[in-house]
Image (cartoon, helix red, strand yellow):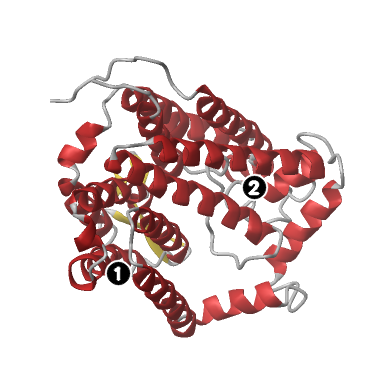
Amino acid sequence: MVKISRQKSGFDFWLLGAFIALVLIGAATLTSAGTAIGYQTFNDSYYFIKHQLLKGLLPGLALFIALTFINYRFWKKISPIFLFVSIALLILVFIPGLSLTFNNSKSWVNVGPFSFQPAEIVKLLFILYLAGWLSKQPDEKIKSFSYGFLPFIFLVGIISILIIMQPDVGTLSVLLVAAFCAYFVRGANWKHVILLITLGLAAFVILIKIAPYRTERLMTFLHPELDPQGIGYHINQAFLAIGSGGFWGRGFGHSRQKFQYLPETTGDSIFAVFAEELGFVFSVLLIALFIFLAFRIYKLLKEQDDQFAKLVCAGILGWFLFQSFYNIGSMIGVLPMTGIPLIFISYGGTSVLSAMAAMGILMNISRKKQR
């Protein structure tokens, strides 16, 4: 039975405040960024924010509130089933009649009037599973190659193969970072950590080699001035948007690049629209808000005596921090583009729903005493 935790000394209200601020900023930014493409595609300037509210923010808020009051220890008890649920969800995208394909990627599932992205849900489910599995292992097994490292590689490998087959390298990279953070915090052997990093870099090289479009993206990242009207168009338009925002920006709602110039204005390019409209100062403040959120999660992690709670915090911290800063880094040209959305800001009902659910679990963990 689900146990409802009773409050003893309250929540981390700084963490809650940072979360609320990011959700509100995201809703406002999406409202502006989606006006042009919404009107052109759906004859409704507010199409994207309406759908974000109905399919992401409002259900996400309900889930956030519910998970805030469910004792996080309940997830440890049922964590073994999350591996099987994750595998089942990822298999759904390959079933004819359910699968939806966007940009040559089978990442979506359609069930009646609803569609969702299984990999976004798997981010949280797999973190909970790993936290449960790792927290139950003795320290000597975690540091063992045969009983710690190899099982970890096997578990991560199953999920990775299913995501690569979609393919969705962006989501995979986020999940791998989250898994690595949990494994590292649990006390992994340093030799195994170095081996993991080496294997990750080797896998990255292989993925680039087997898909020509990934090579093109890498070359565009290294030399964005090449082919400005072709493969380099996206990043060059992002540079133009961010640069034209200047110090204070053009003003909220006054982006020019969102009018059919900048691709993916509601998705992975939304930071460029934000920077164009609100400028350098508010862009720095937004980045500072993400850093503050990460700091509060890290502080929460350090306060935990419960190994499961600590590992959940570690996985979510890796997820949020990597996803937000990879997106921003790709928009300013310091990282290659992979289509990773800006957490809490970009359009995507499943993405925001999963992130808000994760925040609900963190808020429950932040309660100082539970019974």
The answer to whether residue 344 is visible is no
Tell me the residue at 21%/40% (across/down). Answer: 76
Q: Residue 161 has which mark?
A: 1
**Which corner quadrant holds the N terminus?**
top left
Is 92 left, or right, of 209 in this rendering? left
Relative to 343, residue 50 above or below:
above
Q: Position of residue 153 (x, y in %)?
A: 27, 69
Residue nearest the observer in this picture, 136 or 119: 136
Q: Residues within 10 Å of mark 1 (few under 14, many from 20)?
A: few
Relative to 53, residue 86 above or below:
below
The answer to whether residue 124 is visible is yes
Disc 1 secondary structure class = helix
Disc 2 secondary structure class = helix
Tell me the residue at 49%/80% (across/down). Answer: 208
Residue denoted by label 2 = 270
Residue nearest the observer in this picture, 87 or 304: 304
**Residue reaching furthest to the bottom:** 209
The kind of residue on which mark 1 rests is Ile
Residue nearest the observer in this picture, 317 or 274: 317
Tell me the residue at 28%/48% (across/down). Answer: 131
The total of numbered circles placed on residues is 2
Q: Position of residue 32 (x, y in %)?
A: 68, 36
